[in-house]
Image (cartoon, grey):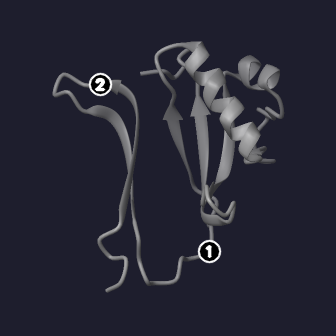
């Protein structure tokens, strides 16, 4: 199957005692059609400092993917808002070469200052 062995692993969070990141998402290429987005999301804890969080926000803002989920009150539409709520969201995963959305999954990106930080 073409592309069946193509894998992207995205890890973030602190390194565990085993030397592995504590959070990882594994994306596998597939020839199967992608089901429509059903609204679920993942929460990712970003970096070791608030500066790491701000860097991730700026990268998402530059890519044009910062998104507000109307179901929640944390409407972070700027870096100041993301810092106030200690989180922001994006949902489109882009092909960095074409800018095309390749997958949709809401990511709630949380700062080390977030009250739910592990």
Callout 2: 10 Å neighbours few (<14), some, many (20+)? Answer: few
- What's the mark number on residue 86? none
Query: For this view, does 25 lie left or right of residue 99?
Result: left
Q: Secondary structure at mark 2?
A: strand
Residues at marks 1 and 2, CA–CA distance in whole angstroms: 33 Å
59 or 70: which is nearer to us? 59
Of helix, strand and loop, which one carries label 1? loop
Q: Residue at left 75%, top 38%?
A: 61
Viewer-closest of 95 and 21:
95
Q: Is residue 29 above or below residue 8?
A: below
Sequence-first tag of 1 and 2: 2
Position of 14 with respect to 97 (left or right) is left
Provide residue 30's location: percent of width, then percent of height. 41, 77
Is residue 11 positioned above or below 1 on the image?
above
Which of 45/53 is in front? 53
Residue highlighted by disc 2: 15
Please identify the quadrant where the C terminus is shown. top left
The residue at the point 18 percent across, 22 percent down is 17
Residue 114 in view here: no
Which quadrant of the rendered structure holds the N terminus? bottom left
Q: Residue at x 81, y 35 (%)?
A: 75
- In the image, which disc is placed on residue 36? 1
Left or right of 55 on screen, residue 112: left
The vertical placement of 35 against 50, above or below, is below
- Image quarter of residue 85: top right
User: Residue 22: percent from the left, percent from the top?
Assistant: 32, 32
x, y percentage for residue 51?
60, 15
Classify residue 38 as left or right of residue 1. Answer: right
Q: Nearer the viewer, mark 1 or mark 2?
A: 2
Above or below residue 35? Residue 108 is above
């Amino acid at each position: 199957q073409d592309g069946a062995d193509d894998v992207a692993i995205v890890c973030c969070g602190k390194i565990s005692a085993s030397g592995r990141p504590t959070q990882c998402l594994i994306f596998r290429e597939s020839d199967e059609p992608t089901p429509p987005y059903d609204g679920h999301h993942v929460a990712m804890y970003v970096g070791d400092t608030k500066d790491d969080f701000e860097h991730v926000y700026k990268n998402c803002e530059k890519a044009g993917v910062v998104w507000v989920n109307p179901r929640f009150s944390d409407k972070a539409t700027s870096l100041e808002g993301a810092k106030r709520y200690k989180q922001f969201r994006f949902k489109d995963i882009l092909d960095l070469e074409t800018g095309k959305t390749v997958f949709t999954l809401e990511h709630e990106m949380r700062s080390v200052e977030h009250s739910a930080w592990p």
